[in-house]
Every structure is written in structure tokens, then in C-alpha cells.
Image: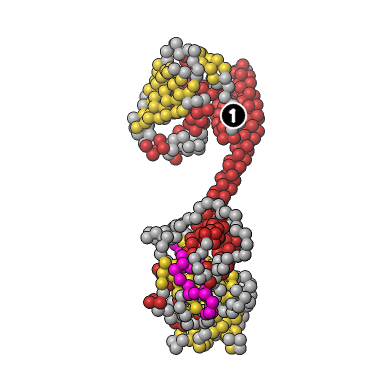
Amino acid sequence: MLTLSITNKLEQQQLTHKGGALEVGRGPARPGAVRVVVKDAFVSRDHVRIEEAPGKKVKVTNLSGKAPVTVDGHAVVQPGTDATYLLPARLALGETVIDIDSGDAEPQSVNNMRTIAAGRPVQPAGHQTVVQGAPPPAAAGAAPPPLIERSETAKPEEIIGWLETVVAVQKAGDREAFFKQAAQALVEKIGLDTGLVLLRDGEAWRTVALVARDDYSKGRPFSHGVLNQALESRQTVYVGSALGGGDSLVGVQGVVVSPFFGAKGEVRGAIYGTRLQRAKGREIGALEAQVTQLLATAVGANMQRLEQDEEANRLRVAKDAAEEADRTKSGFLAMVSHELRTPLTTIIGYSEMMIEQAEADNLPQYVADLRTVHTAGHHLLALINDILDFSKIEAGKLDIAKEPYDAAALIRDLMVSVEPLAKKNNNRLELDCPVDLGTGSGDPTRIRQCVLNLVGNACKFTKDGAVTVTARRTGSLLSVAVSDTGIGMSADQQARLFQAFTQVDSTAGRKYGGTGLGLAISQKLCRMMGGDIAVESELGKGSTFTMTFAAQLV
């Protein structure tokens, strides 16, 4: 096992590599290779491969095409070559320094390790302790001594001060702030000599905050052995007595480590503090470990809160962008529809005039072609009107009129206009409409549009059958049901029936025509008029569409 410390101007990574080859470079991992990516423009995309060798040695292979690797300040591994060196070893590539040592350099006896699990639930969801409430004003006077240097019981205001620190960490507005506050609390509130906040980055560890006393000697800042013990147990680990071991434990009397967790219970990082060998103060004990665990809990909770806020903000921005795009689309459709409808109306008008003139001049050879132009023009105009209505509804710019109308007369007049549709497929059109439906108040144009759409669909999807229109009054509501004996629909087809630009299936669109907008528009119009459209259907046995709307009948 190898321990590595990777340092440059932009980052510091600490990791333990248990076996096999490990590549270090600026580019992404290659297939089948374990890779540590460094942020150094002077490091090659694939720069160096590191592999443990027998006898506490390391094999270094230079993968770069032109950049050398310097080992221990004097030896050079040229591009495309490899060499083996005794551990510990220091590699220099670009502006990055890699310190490599044997993982066996820090033996830890489990018997000397103690853990704290108070306040942590049994399930692997991580620390869940949450400190709530606003902190009271800070006490006046001199700062109390750190926790580890106390010889008497803490005063209430001092305990409040510790809790204030935990709450401040949990409420900090950005990651850098609460990482720094947590590391600072280990030194100032607990009285340790170093305080670190580490984040997991794959197999590596990244130091995001480090606070140390003036007499702290620079070196590898933490022990992989102690850290791994905390991660494996998923509990706070503290060692109070002298440790000994590798470079990171030289002169260290005690260590405390507490992992913090993500929303899914995964270890996201750890709070790590050390106590140097000194006469003043007692060993790290359970009380210091408990306060460290509170800090870790606060860091984990704040990370989850910030991530949730960032995700909510991301979704809000995406929602706003989607709504703006939808408004832009609707505006574009409305503009294009108007630009198309104006010349198309002219074409229809001129075709009508030419048909009349051709009939008057007894030129039947032209009449048939002119009628084709006229019919196609009306069909295209209907499609454009549907698109225009749909875009207006989506943009919230379609208004529903309020004017009186005779409900029974409106329905009966509609039957006259749809009679040709029924005859086209040899269907029988039946009407059940009482004459005393009353006078309604609403938008007769939109009511006529909805009923025509339902009856037109029924006639289109029915052949040699019957289409029945039934109108009824229920209080202030008017309902119109259109039943047919046509092809019917399955449950899956009914589920997507009212989606815009969607038809019962792709083959139906080719066989029967249409854009798939009619039912979507009719449903939206009915809802704007205080009603809705319901459907009952069985495949092969026909369908019944029932539209209801507020008619304020009198």
C-alpha cells in the first residue's frame, strides 16, 4: 500500500493506493487505468505511472512524450523509461510535487483507538444531529480557555459559546466559510494544534481548510491510518496517547477524526484535528471527540442544505428558461400563422370568384381544378387557425367572450354544417337535443368550434356507422356528448389523447390526416369556459366524448 501527497499551486491531494498501477496526469483516465487528475498546465495529459515494488520500493514510469520526471531532487526519469527507487520518494513533474511513502509507515493498533458513536443513528445515513435556534449574543470579557486546557467545569456561557460555533458553521452561507470556521473551531474552541476539513475526491483526499498554531511544523498534515479507521467504522475516532509512526505523526500526541456524510449516507469528508506533544493540557478525550463530532454534523448538514439550494436554483433557472422558450415559440407561431392566413384568405377568395366566373362562362374543364384549390385552401386555413388558437392559449392571450345565445338553436345549426362530414363515410347522424335548453351566456364561437371538432373526429374515425349528438342541461352547466360506433381506443391511447400534436397512433395520422391539435385545443377551451372533456372508449367498439361548460342558462 502507498500513501501519496500531491501538491501544487492550485490544490493539495492526499490518498492511499492499495495496489496495482496508479497514473497521474492532467487528462482523464484511460480505459482500465486508475488515474489521479492534477490541475497543472505543465503536467502532461498522461505523465507518470506509479506502482509499489517489493522491498519498500516504488517503480516510476514516465508516460510523457517529452517531459522528464525528477526524483528526490537529482535523479531523472526520461520520457518512455522507468526506474525503481526506495521509499519514501519525492517526484517533481511540472509545478506538481508528489511525496510517496509506504502505507505501512503508520502502524495503528486498534486497541489504542477509541470511538464515539453518541448522537449518530444506527442506520448508515450518517450524522443526523441538528442544532437549531439563533445564537445568543456573545459574552463580554476575555475569551475562555480552550476546551482541552480546562481544569474545571465549563461555565454555562462557555458551553453556549461552543454551541454558537456549531450553529455558525451550520448557517454559513458558502462552503469556504463554514469549512474555515470548522477548522478554526478545532484550534480555538477545542484547543488542538491543527484543524483540517478534508473532502473525498474519488480515492484521493482534498484539503479544503487548514488552520494551525504558529508552532505547527509543516509536513504531511494527516495520518492515513487514523483517517481510514474512522472511515471504516463510520464513527468519530480519537487517540489520546502518544502515537509514533510515519511523518504525519512525528511529534503528535493525539488525533481526533470525525467523518461527515451526504444525503444518501455516503462519506463526503472528515474533520481532522491533531494535538502536539506538550506539557500543558490533558489528552484528547471523549468530550473533545463529541464536540468534534458536532462540528462534523454541522458541516455535513450545511453541505446538504447548500446542495439542495443549488439544485432548487438550477431547477428554477431551467423552469424559467423552458417557460421563456415556450412563450417565444408561441409568439413565433402566432406571427407566422397571421402572415400565412392573410395571403391564404386572398387565395380562397379569388378561387371562389374564379369558380363563379368559370361556371358563368360554361367552362367546366376549369371548375374541378379550381374547386380543388378552394378545398385545399380551406383545409390549410383550418390547420393554421388551429395553430394560431393553440399558440394564443399557450401564451395566455386568447379571450373568452360573454354574449347571449340560444343553446338548442346553436346545436341544431351545427348539425346542418356537419352533415356533409357524416355522408362522406356513409355515417348516420342522429341528434338528441331538447328545445328547452334555454339561453346561455358565453362564447358561442368557441362552443361551436369544440362541438365541430368532436363531431368531425367521430365522422372521420367511423365508417358505415352512426354518430349521435346528445345535449343536456344540468343546472347552469351545458353538456354535449358525441358518441360513435367507430374504431375506438385502447387505454394507452386514451392516456395520451389530449396531448398537443399527438394522435392515437402514427398509422392513424397517415390514414385519417390531421395535426393532433383539435382535441388539445377543445379541452383547453372547455376548461377556460369552466368545464372539461371526458372520454369513454373501447377498442373496436366506438367512443363517447362528453364536453361540459358553464353556460349560465336562463
- Report the span colored magenta: 263-290
Residue 56, position in %: x, y? 46, 86
> With respect to residue 177, does 401 lie above or below?
above
Q: Residues within 10 Å of mark 1 (few under 14, many from 20)?
A: some
> With respect to residue 324, does 517 lie above or below?
above
> Is 282 contained in the magenta span?
yes
Image-quadrant location for residue 401: top right
Furthest residue in direction front, as rendered: 152
Comparing 150 with 125, the one in front is 150
Task: Please give the residue where the numbered disc 1 appears in the rendered image.
Answer: 398
> With respect to residue 113, does 352 lie above or below?
above
Residue 348, position in %: x, y? 61, 25
Residue 324 horizontal side relative to residue 2, left or right: right
In percent of the image, x 59 and y 72: which residue is there?
A: 212
> Is 392 contained in the magenta span?
no
Comparing 266 with 240, the one in front is 240
Q: Evaluate whether residue 532 shows in this view.
A: yes
Q: Evaluate whether residue 372 shows in this view.
A: no
In percent of the image, x 50 and y 53: which residue is there?
A: 132
Residue 339, position in %: x, y? 65, 33
Image-quadrant location for residue 446: top right
In percent of the image, x 61 and y 42: which residue is there?
A: 324
**Disc 1 residue type (three-letter):** Leu
Furthest residue in direction top, as rendered: 436
Helix, strand or loop at label 1? It is loop
Image quadrant for the N terminus? bottom left
